[in-house]
Amino acid sequence: MDAEDLVEEPPTTLVDLLNNTLIWRQTAPYLPPGSVLALSATARALRHTVCESPETFRHLNLTLVKSAATLVDSSPIDSGGISWRAERMDESLTEDDFYSGPLRGIFSKLERQHLIFNVKTMILDGLSVPAELVRDIIVDDRFNVKILSIRKVTNMNQRGLQSVLRYVVRPSASSLPRLKGLYLFGHKDAAATPSSRDTSMSSGRISAGVMSSEGAQIGAEWNARSEVALSAALLGHDQPLEEWWRTRGNVFGPNNTIKDTPSSDWADILLACQGVIAFDAVLCRA
């Protein structure tokens, strides 16, 4: 036996694991943006791994980022504390600029770090998202978003959004939009709640460790959904989980699943976008 065979291999480190593209791609979506940046600040090797990988912000969920939700809580105009507030009293500031300020600030930071173009899935549910900001996300070359979720957002001009969508799918357009899917009509995802098993574990002395984090709970929830869908498929139950496919008749309205009824103009928009941009709604085929 050679002496080289007796030399033990060094143990696998966290950097080694995160340098594995497959592992990092599956892990990153469950980490809040703030946690990702905090991780990159712990060591130079991790900073290179996190900031250089195109998988880091492939899935960007800003719904839980406090600076993105500044306008949602209707905080007073002079509360200060965030740099973009200093521009609030600028008379040249448009209404869209004002209401999109928090998100534009975040996008600018990601752009300076050359990360914004890596975002493929962006979730802005419940935030302040004017139609002009959606236009920039779809049209501006800085962005490369394939799936955008803007369910239950505030300060959205519906007619302005319709105009944006008509513009990007117009027949005379030189190329198709990068955006392939738009979540707009449905409910926001419910916040993850701990199960009874999680509660009992937390009340005892045994720690759940990494599984106690919010990202891990969300991941577990989606794993559970996948198991249900797979079981239904294997058993031949042709009943998808989405409410659109298990409800007959109208979905919108006070007595239906989704209370806020959109204007009838949206039917024309969905028809115009057919085959180009998919929505979380389906047209009546009766």
Image (spheres, grey):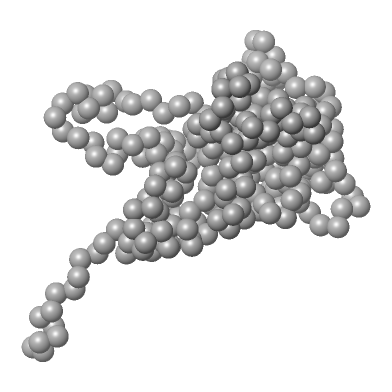
Viewport quadrant of the N terminus: bottom left
Q: Residue at (69%, 29%) from the top-left corner?
A: 88
How far across and down, in percent of the image, does residue 113 sit?
A: 55, 56
**In the rendered image, which quarter is residue 95 located in?**
top right
Q: Residue at (62%, 31%) from the top-left corner?
A: 85
Q: Is residue 228 left or right of residue 187?
A: left
Q: Residue furthest bottom?
A: 2
Q: In the rendered view, tell whether residue 211 sits above or below residue 244.
A: below
Q: Is residue 45 left or right of residue 25?
A: left
Residue 63 visible to the viewer: no
Q: Residue furthest right?
A: 172
Say how many tags the image has.
Answer: 0
Q: Residue at (60%, 18%) from the top-left corner?
A: 76
**In the rendered image, which quarter is residue 176 located in?**
bottom right
How far across and down, in percent of the image, does residue 170 sit?
A: 87, 46
Of 245 and 255, nearer the camera is 255
**In the rendered image, which quarter is residue 11 located in?**
bottom left
Q: Is residue 224 left or right of residue 212?
A: right
Q: Is residue 194 left or right of residue 143?
A: left
Q: In the rendered view, tell whether residue 105 sits above or below residue 268.
A: below
Q: Residue furthest top?
A: 255
